[in-house]
Image (cartoon, helix red, strand yellow):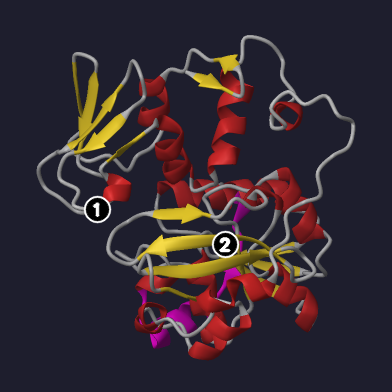
Amino acid sequence: MILRNVDLDVDFLEELEAFDIWDKQRLRENEFQACSPFRNESHPSFSVNIETGLWVDFGSVYEETKSGNFVQLLAFLREETTTESIDYLLEKYAPFNVDVETLQLNMNLSLEEPEPKVFDREELKHLFGESEYLKGRGVHPLAQEMLDAGHDKKHNAVVLPWHDKDGNIINVKFRSIKQKYFWYLEGQQIKNHVYGLWLIRKLRKDTAYIVESEIDALFLWSLGFAAIALGRARISKKQRELILDSGITKLIIATDNDRAGRSCGLELIKELNGYIELRCIDFPNGVKDVNDMDKDVCKKVCENHRPINFKVL
């Protein structure tokens, strides 16, 4: 696999098996087969060639998820931009130490660094506006407006802009309404930002809930709880720095109630304990995330956050 002019010997099977989302997975010769990660199905129709990394979803009726390359799939699984997935693969598999930021310039040796991408709001204004899908997920129209959420009619997708700490739009995540699929504009890497943090700073909130997904954060804002999201089930060094510099003094961990979410919660404790007061919520049995609860239950659960018991960690 060649990325940014570097030939990588990627262990595609190892990368796939690192995720616990697969259902009915099996290995047949050079193919990894499982139920599709993009939709619900009971009979496996998704296949990845473990020699090339190319994948096919034989049951998909949508062009964007019928087939693709490994970087596209990995970005989906890691919940990040394709640029971030390329960086990850280069750092792990390059046969020599590489500076991913330099390689990102296609080996351009110019000492001038490009300006970080910031989007003109006028260019995106056709995407802003109330999303019926988000409204159906319990997200109040005012919360949508506050965080510039919207709807992309052309692709029938929810629009979830990401901002820098000053409120500039630096990327936009699109989440398909018809299937489990998302994509980004070619903006800044989300690992260098925290969703909703600019609003925390603007409103001078010193207490916030931290979740994984943007929709979970929007849902909590709708219930009157200030919230930020990592965009995935892990925290980067830059996100840690931004949170510590945000003015937040109390952070309530509300990451997903699954293995990845609990692991993310432990990572947050490791990275932030001693710097910020940390607390957590207790999910009812069978609940996956905050948006999986009705409003009244979620309010009660969030209001009853508790200190972390370090003895059981």
Q: Main secondary structure of the magenta part?
A: helix
Label 2: which secondary element: strand
119 vs 125, left or right, is right
Q: Is residue 97 magenta?
A: no
Residue 245 location (% of width, % of height): 84, 61
User: Residue 203 occupies which quadrant of the picture?
Assistant: bottom right
Residue 19 location (% of width, % of height): 39, 37
Specify few, some or many for label 2: CA neighbours under 10 Å numbering under 14, 14-19, or 20 or more. many
Residue 17 location (% of width, % of height): 36, 29
Can residue 303 be seen? no
Q: Which residues are magenta?
A: 293-312
Specify few, some or many for label 1: CA neighbours under 10 Å numbering under 14, 14-19, or 20 or more. few
Residue lying at the far left of the rendered structure: 43
- Return the residue at label 2: 172
Residue found 43% across the figure and 17% down from its top: 11
Residue 115's place in the image compared with 199, above or below, is above
Residue lying at the far right of the rendered structure: 111
Label 1: which secondary element: loop
Instruction: Report how far apart the C-alphas of labels 2 and 1 lie in the structure.
Output: 21 Å
Residue found 69% across the figure and 56% down from its top: 193
Can residue 147 be seen? yes
- Return the residue at label 1: 62
- Residues 93 and 232: in front is 93
Residue 43's place in the image compared with 180, above or below, is above
Residue found 62% across the figure and 83% down from its top: 146
Q: Earlier in the sequence, mark 2 or mark 1?
A: 1
- Labels in figure, total: 2
Q: Is residue 300 magenta?
A: yes
Numbered circle sitting on residue 9: none
Q: Amino acid at mark 2?
A: Val
Q: Amino acid at mark 1?
A: Tyr
Residues marked 2 and 1 touching at CB (< 8 Å): no
